Amino acid sequence: MSDQSYLDKKYFVSPYVYNCPFCNRNNITYDLPQSYRFDWTDKKKCYVYFAQCSSCKNTSMHLSYESFVNGDASYRNLRFKDGIEIDSKIFYSVPTSFFTLDNRIHEIIRELITEAEGCLKMNFLTGASVCMRKAIYELLVLEKAEGDDYESRIKYLKNKYPEADPSYFDILSHIQGMTSDKIHEQSWDKWDSKNLKLIIETLRNVLIDIYVIPAEKKERVLRIEKLREGLVKDQKGKQEPTK
């Protein structure tokens, strides 16, 4: 069987199912309850599509310069057309990604990454670059990373979390322009889109390795422990003599 895990990284899998950015369910059905058209410029139209999850009922918004639904865009309960790459037709979405950062990650960092993704979608590379620099800076502050310069502080995190993938920290430590005197929100040098995508994805994985995976592991251990305790309690009840 061919590997289709790439579908989990898409927003819209097909005209009928998508990966919900709210309840984080993959391959869940959705509807397009509303769609509108407005003038982006005096010569260009823009189309707004609202997608509603059939499970959690939350609604996401998507912008495109093309109309690619069955029926007129002013109608309700539409469907995207079959046989097209839906994600490639959309230039901006809210939420900006199918992957919503876990709330176990600090809110400041989540907001900065979300803003960086939004800027990148609109090709605002300076804004995206500033947000990512600030996100990394906030992570180092929150973790009380020690060191005389940026690279040594990233190395501190690498040593602090040995269970995390070390390659992610290696990528972050070699980001061009992240010197000790420029690691703050006043650093305005922009990265190109390829570097930004790499930095965003790398930082996401660092955050997952640091905050999400250990918490999930702890939760699994607690569930097993509760099941074990329940089994031991049942066995003790069976062994106690009846009066």
Image: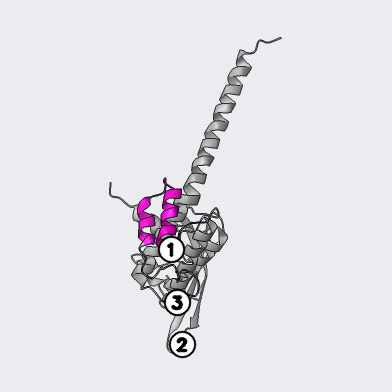
| Residue lying at 51% horizontally and 66% vertically, measured from the top left | 112
Q: Amino acid at mark 1?
A: Asp
Secondary structure beneath dot 1 equals: loop
- Residue 18 percent across, percent down from the top left: 44, 58
Label 2, secondary structure: give it: loop
Residue displayed at 41% across by 52% down: 158
Near mark 3 (Cα within 10 A), the count class, few <14, some 14-19 or many ≥20, is some
Mark 1 or mark 3: whose residue is earlier in sequence = 1
The residues tagged by marks 3 and 2 sit, at their Cα atoms, a distance apart of: 29 Å
The answer to whether 94 appears left or right of 158 in the picture is right
Which one is earlier in the sequence, the residue at label 3 or at label 2? 2
Q: Determine the CA span between mark 1 and mark 3.
A: 19 Å
Q: Do the residues under discs 2 and 1 have CB atoms within 8 angstroms? A: no
Q: Which residue is mark 2?
A: 41
> Magenta stretch mostly in which secondary structure?
helix
The tag earlier along the polypeptide, 2 or 1, is: 2
> In the image, what residue type sits under mark 3?
Trp
Kind of residue at badge 2:
Thr
The residue pinned by badge 1 equals 149
Q: Which residue is mark 3?
A: 188
Foreground tag (2 vs 1): 1
What are the residue bounds of the magenta stretch?
151-173
Label 2 – label 1 distance at C-alpha:
47 Å
Local packing at callout 2 (Cα closer than 10 Å; few below 14, some 14-19, many 20+) is few
In the rendering, at what x and y percent does residue 177 appear?
38, 71
